[in-house]
Amino acid sequence: MYVCICNGVTDRDIAAAAAAGCAGVHELTMRTGCGATCGSCVDMAADLLAQAHGRRESEVVALSDIACAA
Ligand code: FES
């Protein structure tokens, strides 16, 4: 889904940026252009970035649980 119409940034682009280490919206804007024009997408982009980080942290916890159980 397109999150930033002005710059053609999708939810997948945001997830990929998060996976590549993008820590915040300012960095996301520098990497993808998301939010650089009208700014109406910034709140949704921030939410998606936070969700992506939450998902990644959950995956790390799940992997550490597996490693501890072995
Ligand atoms: S919709 Fe993202 S800058 Fe306009």
Image (tube, rainbow, N blue to C red):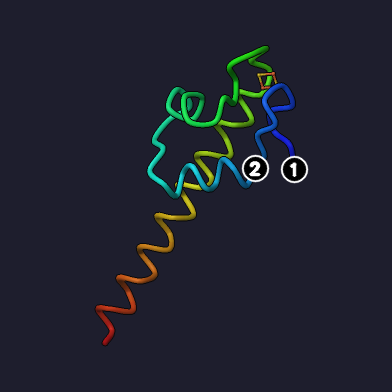
How far from the left and from the top, in percent, is residue 39? Answer: 63, 15
Where ligand 1 lies, by image quadrant? top right
Foreground pick, 35 / 48: 35
Q: Residues within 10 Å of mark 2 (few under 14, many from 20)?
A: some
Name the disc covering residue 11, or none: 2
23 lies left or right of 13: left
Q: Amino acid at mark 1?
A: Met
- Mark 2 and mark 1 in contact (Cβ < 8 Å)? yes
Pick out the residue farthest to the bottom: 70
Q: Amino acid at mark 2?
A: Asp
Q: Secondary structure at mark 2?
A: helix
Q: Earlier in the sequence, mark 1 or mark 2?
A: 1
How far from the left and from the top, in percent, is residue 14? Answer: 56, 40
Disc 2 C-beta below 8 A from ligand 1: no
Identify the residue under disc 1.
1
How far from the left and from the top, in percent, is residue 60? Answer: 36, 62
How far from the left and from the top, in percent, is residue 31? Answer: 48, 30
Distance between the Cα atoms at labels 1 and 2? 6 Å
